[in-house]
Image (cartoon, rainbow, N blue to C red):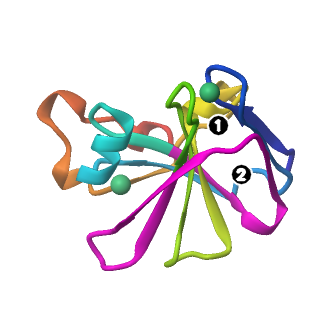
Amino acid sequence: MSALIGGCACGQVKFRAEGGAKFAFICHCRACQHLSGTGHAAAVASDRDQFTVSGNPAVFTRPSDSGHEVSQHFCQTCGSPLYNTMTRGPGLVMIDWGALDDPSAITPDRVFEEHNAADWDRVPWHEYA
Ligand SMILES: [Zn+2]
Ligand SMILES: [Zn+2]
């Protein structure tokens, strides 16, 4: 699996995920709506122990609906969402799709919290899986 590289809009933060993509998803939960600023987040899961970051992203930690902690990392200068880590899956890092240098290389293969999707934001993900 080829490495994933990416970073924020202003270039201050860069990351490299040597483990590549394990799976990719769309999530319509309320927290993902807040952090993406729109109807859903799209993210790619990769191995956390092979994930390296340069720059100094800010971190915002919140409880998830299921009671675990989710820590969202974003650039302190431009505010770009970058990736999150969660106590529920400590071996993984969830990289925000838009932060990838080549997002077109990754297609989401599953959807979470679809019941919370806005009517205008129903992603036909079944066609991609
Ligand atoms: Zn930035
Ligand atoms: Zn979510």
Of mark 1 and mark 2, the one earlier in the sequence is 2
Magenta span contains residue 118: no
Residue occupying image coordinates x 65% and y 20%:
10
- Comparing 49 with 127, the one in front is 49
- Judged from the image, the secondary structure of the residue bearing numbered disc 2 is loop
Q: Which residue is mark 2?
A: 21
Q: Are marks 1 and 2 in contact (CB under 8 Å)?
A: yes
- Comparing 59 with 105, the one in front is 59
Q: Quadrant of residue 106?
A: top right
Residue type at tag 1: Ile
Q: Quadrant of residue 118?
A: top left
Residue occupying image coordinates x 71% and y 51%:
21
What type of secondary structure mainly makes up the magenta span?
strand
Q: Label 1, label 2: how many angstroms apart (C-alpha)?
A: 8 Å
- Judged from the image, the secondary structure of the residue bearing numbered disc 1 is loop
Image coordinates for residue 13, horizontal then vertical, percent? 71, 35
Highlighted magenta segment, given as a residue range:
43-72
